[in-house]
Amino acid sequence: MRPNFSRLSLTIALALISVYPAMGQYLGSGGGAQPQPARSATSPQAIRQWFDRYDNIRRQAQMNPADRKRADEVMSKGLAVIIPGDDKTAAQAFMRKLIQKDGAGAEQLKQLPLYPETENLHRGYYRYFTQAAKLFDDYITVQNNVFASDANGQPLAAGLPARKAALEELDNSNKALDAQLRQRFNIPAYSYIPPN
């Protein structure tokens, strides 16, 4: 018995027609990318308000010049040798203060609206604050146990210098993006204001 090709062709064609819309969701029409809906621009007033709040968050979390110098000294000293006794206690108390400030900064950034124009800066500083807090916390862990390891079983101490360098690179990248956005939206440059 010979198969009826016209009936078989019709069945396959109907099956493809019913499946094609579902395939289109994964592949896009014609296999290309679907155009993304246009985002509406955020008002200049909302951008200015965002920068006011963001600047305040940065100022609260930012280390003053003396703290930055001390953090660099403590971390470089701590990576070379284990800090003994009272120095260790003071260094860890200082690092806990930095963890608290960075954690608070990250939490406060969550409260800011996420605008398309400032999204990369917003996420960049959130990453900075969370990574800094984790770095300082891991530093304390290493001071308490030089053989401590991360979740993958790798020694924490070995990775701290590279993580510190990556954090500095992220900070520089964030600052460059911050300057570009301020110029674009005519926002005054960020300036460090010491707390009262």
Image (cartoon, grey):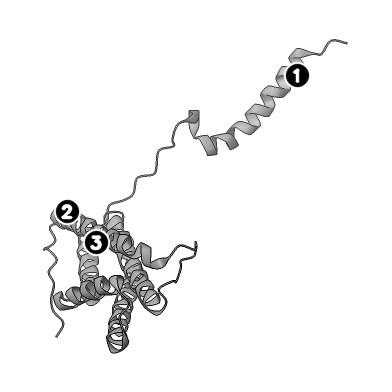
Task: Give the residue number, with chain letter if any, for mark 2.
Answer: 180
Gap in angstroms between the C-alphas marked 3 and 2: 19 Å
Q: Could you say which quadrant of the image residue 172 lies in?
A: bottom left
Badge nearest the viewer, 3 or 2: 3
| Closest to the observer, 1 or 15 | 1
Where does label 3 land, which residue? 168
**Circle 3 SS class:** helix
- Mark 2: few/some/many CA within 10 Å (<14, 14-19, 20+): some
Q: Which residue is the site of mark 1?
A: 8
Q: Position of residue 134 (x, y in %)?
A: 37, 70
Rendered residue at 40%/76% (across/down): 141
Query: Is any part of residue 57 visible from this angle?
Result: no
Residue 2 shown left or right of residue 63 in the figure = right
Residue type at tag 3: Glu
Give x and y (percent) for residue 38: 35, 45
Above or below 165: residue 83? below
First reached walking from the N terminus: tag 2 or tag 1: 1
Image position of 9 (left or right of 1): left
Tell me the crowding category of disc 1: few under 14, some 14 to 19, or many 20 or more residues within 10 angstroms, Cα based: few
Residue 140 lies, in percent from the top left, at 36, 77
Specify the quadrant that holds the C terminus. bottom left
